[in-house]
Image: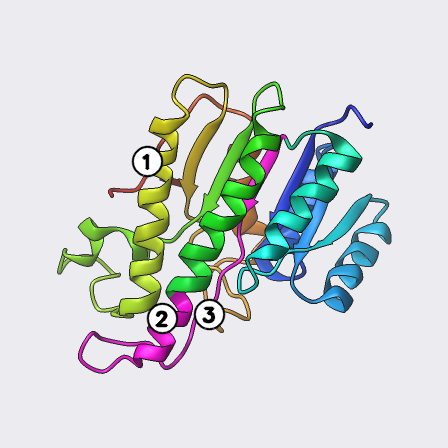
Amino acid sequence: MRKERVALVTGANKGIGLEIARQLAQAGIHVIIGARDEGRGRAAVDVLAAQGLVADYLRVDLDDLPSAEAAAIRIKAEHGKLDILVNNAGIFDFADGPPGAASIDAVRRVMEVNFIGTLAVTQAMLPLLRQAPAGRIVNVSSSLGSLTLNGDPASIYYSQRFIGYNASKAALNLLTIQLAEELRDTPITVNSVSPGFVKTDLTGRGILTPEEGAKCPVQYALAGEENGSFVEADGKTPW
């Protein structure tokens, strides 16, 4: 089995996820591209290979919970451990919106993918993270998941009312809080990291490039003593 540090990045076939995978690979980490579509996942591996970077592909579909267990079995067989888990995969549904108008089906799907799916992947990978000398979990969150900012009329996020997406990121932050406490006596760190307002296929607009947005999640994936926090590039974000 290989001895280098191993990272699984979910939703790594494009956007912020692919940039996180690229930057981790550049730092000498053996990266596993987690993606639900095999063609897109393997295309991402080829993109990194063209830059002299080595990565593997594993199917991880947050809408298909058994895929997480199957991926964990493969990682255990090939590496014996997992050093870094970056929970990046997520969706946004434009049928989402304010509480009085949002499509219930859209809200349910966003919550099931962004929160339930991420929780399932985390549970599947925890035994492998426990086998690493110092496991690290990065939950890619959003300032839209901050209850403080959602309730502050002076915040730029105050008017961004997407009850499903915002609630899914708030739930992801709760996962960070509770998991960090559950793992307090282990060498595993868990943090929520907001990449900032990045222009991707998910948002369709933004002020940061995926490369810029990936820097903070990569920073917390690689090193640091912070644990159980909600952070972004310019410091801590209020819960």
Q: Which of marks 3 and 2 is in front?
A: 2
Q: Is mark 2 on a helix, strand or loop?
A: helix
Residue 106 falls inside the magenta stretch:
yes
Mark toward the start of the polypeptide (1 vs 3): 1
- Mark 2 crowdedness (10 Å alpha carbons): few <14, some 14-19, many ≥20: some
In which quarter of the view is residue 215 placed? top right
* Cα distance in 3D space between marks 1 and 3: 28 Å
What label does residue 178 carry, if any? Answer: 1
Which residue occupies 42% across, 75% down? Answer: 93
Residue 231 versus residue 71 in the image, above or below: above
Up/down of 192 relative to 116, above or below: above
Left or right: where 99 falls relative to 85: left
Category of crowding for the residue at label 3, using alpha-carbon neighbours closer than 10 angstroms: few (below 14), some (14–19), many (at least 20):
few
Mark 1 and 2 residues: CB-CB less than 8 Å, in contact?
no
Going from the N terminus, do you reach mark 3 or mark 2 first? Answer: 2
Mark earlier in primary sequence (1, 2): 2
Residue 90, position as x, y percentages in the image: 49, 61
Q: Residue 215 carries which label?
A: none
The residues colored magenta run 83-110
Q: Determine the main secondary structure of the stretch shown in magenta.
A: loop
Q: What residue type is labelled 1?
A: Gln
Task: Describe the colour scheme in one phrase.
Answer: rainbow
Query: Which residue is under mark 3?
Result: 203
Q: How far apart are marks 1 and 2 (CA)?
A: 22 Å
